Image: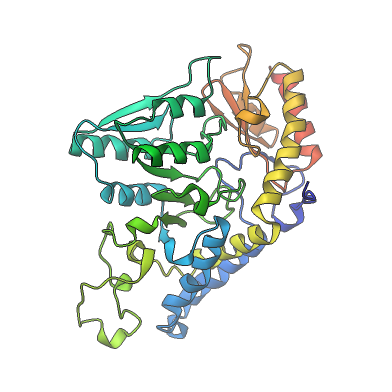
Amino acid sequence: MTDLIPNQRHLFDIPAEVAYLNCATMGPMPIAALEAGRAGLARKAQPWGITSDDFFKDTASLRPKLAQLINARGEQIAFVPSASYALATAAQNITLKAGQDILIMADQFPSNVYVWRDLAARTGAKLQTVAAPDGKMSLSDAMLEAIGPQTGLVACAQVRWTDGTRLDLEAISDKCRSVGAALVLDLTQSCGAMAFDATRIQPDFMVAAGYKWMLGPYSAGFMYVGEQHLGGQPLEHNWITRAGSTDFTQLINYTDELGAGAERFDMGERSNFALLPALEAAVDLLLDWTVERVEQTLGAHNRQLAARLAEIGMPCPDNADRGPHYLGASLPASAPADLTERLKADNIHVSRRGNTLRITPHLYNTTDDTARLIEALKRLI
């Protein structure tokens, strides 16, 4: 077993009295990322110091690091401002026939539903929601059972955002390939906290917003593009993704030739002098820890926390059925409607999704944080 990572609270600006157990809503940026972002933003105060080369340096440095996070090649990485932007790009590059099925999982995040509703309406495909019958099979098994010759596309996550239920992406990927179905993944709730091997899974497209488990800023994320789509159609047409864009003196020599690889899918104004340095600093930290060690460390701590939650009548899904970084504790009928607000008044931060209390710690959380949570829950429910 890999050595667990010691507590990393010193790398974050989190006061001792704050128990922030809500990374699935928004991950706090490390101090190093905040400083990098501030330094980048300050450059805009004196723009005469920004050169044409600066429009390309940050993306050139960060692209291979994002690829390393998921075991991909740098040429397969595009910069996106949001998951919805990437999913819309994927929808534009996937061909479906009338009558084919688009499979999504029950309670999927809205941005990963609306885009497929639209695609189904435009193509005549049928959007099907896959749910796991209570106590009869896992969500992964239900998805695997649903994939068949009629399936044109599976769009899902590695873990469900409401409760952390995990999907077996290797098995789902293998089944998709066996029937010729496309696979689009939203890893916003797992990238940086759960290992993912793009070379093994081979999705058509994969997206991760950077502001949760990647500990980066808002409005900065990335998209992986499968080899077969690298010649695809971008969502927008901007100057910087065109061949020869590094020569500012020749930009009026318009060209239809797009940049190499996934760069053609990059969002407009990708050269964000504040967000990209902040995201890169956060990614550097993840690469230093390694995602595998992050996953194992969070898994070990959460197994202990799950046992304590079960003792007070708030069981979580079995360890094998959830992401190791994620706890979705069942709320008893006695739980007040304003539970999260009461916890927040005690400086304990979690979130509620339906009848599930979503508890998502990270390496900055201490044993005191989790002890305070348990004691508060005993008192409030």
Q: Quadrant of residue 98?
A: top left
Relative to 238, 111 lies left or right: right
105, above or below 218, in the image? above
Q: Residue 309: percent from the left, percent from the top?
A: 72, 24
345, above or below 193, in the image? above
Q: From this viewpoint, is residue 140 visible? A: yes
Q: Residue at x 52, y 61 (%)?
A: 67
Q: From this viewpoint, is residue 341 visible? A: no
Name the outermost residue toward the top.
Answer: 333
Q: Residue at x 20, y 83 (%)?
A: 253
Q: Quadrant of residue 295?
A: top right
Relative to 111, 329 lies left or right: right
Report the number of numbered marks: 0
Q: Residue at x 38, y 58 (%)?
A: 227
352, above or below 180, in the image? above
Name the outermost residue toward the bottom.
Answer: 249
| Observer-nearest of 195 and 33 | 195
Q: Quadrant of residue 155?
A: top left
Q: Residue 85: percent from the left, percent from the top?
A: 35, 51
Quadrant, the C terminus: top right
Name the outermost residue toward the front.
Answer: 178
Q: Residue 363: percent from the left, percent from the top?
A: 72, 48
- Check the image and tell me how it is coloured: rainbow
Relative to 312, 275 lies left or right: left
Q: Residue 165: percent from the left, percent from the top?
A: 56, 30
